[in-house]
């Protein structure tokens, strides 16, 4: 009887540890690079105008891709980010191809005024007529990095 109780206790403790470890692993995988990534607040189309997301700390981030529309590969663009997060130190935007490995396209943005950042960018070569991309916007504050992602499509350039 005592052995059965010990065995049941050991099984329960093991299951709790495995459950906790699984939860932790899923949280780490979901927060790639240690950043709790947020999607846009509402469905939005960067071809039509800026998109907005609420970051993990509750601050708001607004992201826009300025330039010729529709967005074309290898065409100069200007990325704009506005954030009401306290003391934004740095902002960078990474473009990544969805469904096809396109390499890392990283664009650090410069501060233009408090809470406003901008910088040049371009979408890499597209092998498809229309290629889905994801813009990962990273904002660094005193508390660390936060991020939001926005999906868009680019058409084959030239």
Image (spheres, rainbow, N blue to C red):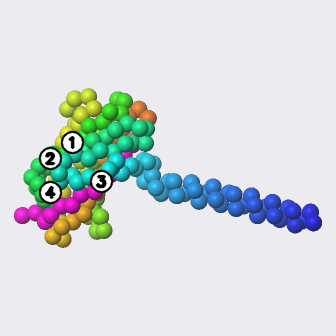
Farthest-out residue, front: 42
- Closer to the chain start, of discs 3 and 1, is 3
- Closer to the chain start, of discs 2 and 1, is 2
Circle 2/circle 3 CB separation < 8 Å: no
Q: Quadrant of the N terminus?
A: bottom right
- Closer to the chain start, of discs 2 and 3, is 3
- Closer to the chain start, of discs 4 and 3, is 3
Mark 3 or 1: in front is: 3
Q: Quadrant of the C terminus?
A: bottom left
User: Position of 18 compared to 152: left or right?
Assistant: right
Marking on residue 66: 2
Horizontal and vertical percent position of residue 40: 33, 49
User: Who's the residue at 41% across and 32% down the image?
Assistant: 142
Residue 10's quadrant in the figure? bottom right
Give how far apart the Cα atoms at labels 2 and 3 are: 19 Å
Can you see residue 11? yes
Above or below residue 93? Residue 23 is: below
- Closer to the chain start, of discs 4 and 1, is 4
> Disc 4 marks which residue?
71
Mark 4 or 3: in front is: 3
Horizontal and vertical percent position of residue 138: 33, 44
Give how far apart the Cα atoms at labels 4 and 3 are: 18 Å
């Amino acid at each position: 009887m005592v052995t059965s109780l010990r065995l049941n206790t050991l099984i329960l403790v093991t299951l709790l540890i495995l459950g906790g470890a699984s939860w932790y692993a899923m949280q780490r995988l979901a927060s790639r690079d240690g950043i709790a990534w947020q999607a846009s607040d509402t469905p939005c189309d960067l071809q039509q105008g800026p998109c907005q997301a609420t970051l993990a700390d509750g601050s708001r981030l607004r992201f826009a891709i300025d330039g010729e529309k529709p967005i074309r590969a290898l065409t100069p663009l200007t990325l704009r980010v506005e954030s009401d997060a306290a003391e934004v130190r740095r902002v960078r935007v990474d473009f990544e191809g969805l469904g096809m490995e396109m390499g890392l396209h990283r664009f650090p943005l410069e501060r233009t005024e408090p809470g406003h950042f901008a910088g040049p960018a371009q979408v890499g070569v597209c092998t498809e007529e229309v290629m889905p991309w994801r813009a990962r916007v990273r904002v660094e504050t005193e508390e660390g990095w936060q991020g939001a992602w926005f999906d868009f499509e680019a058409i084959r350039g030239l």
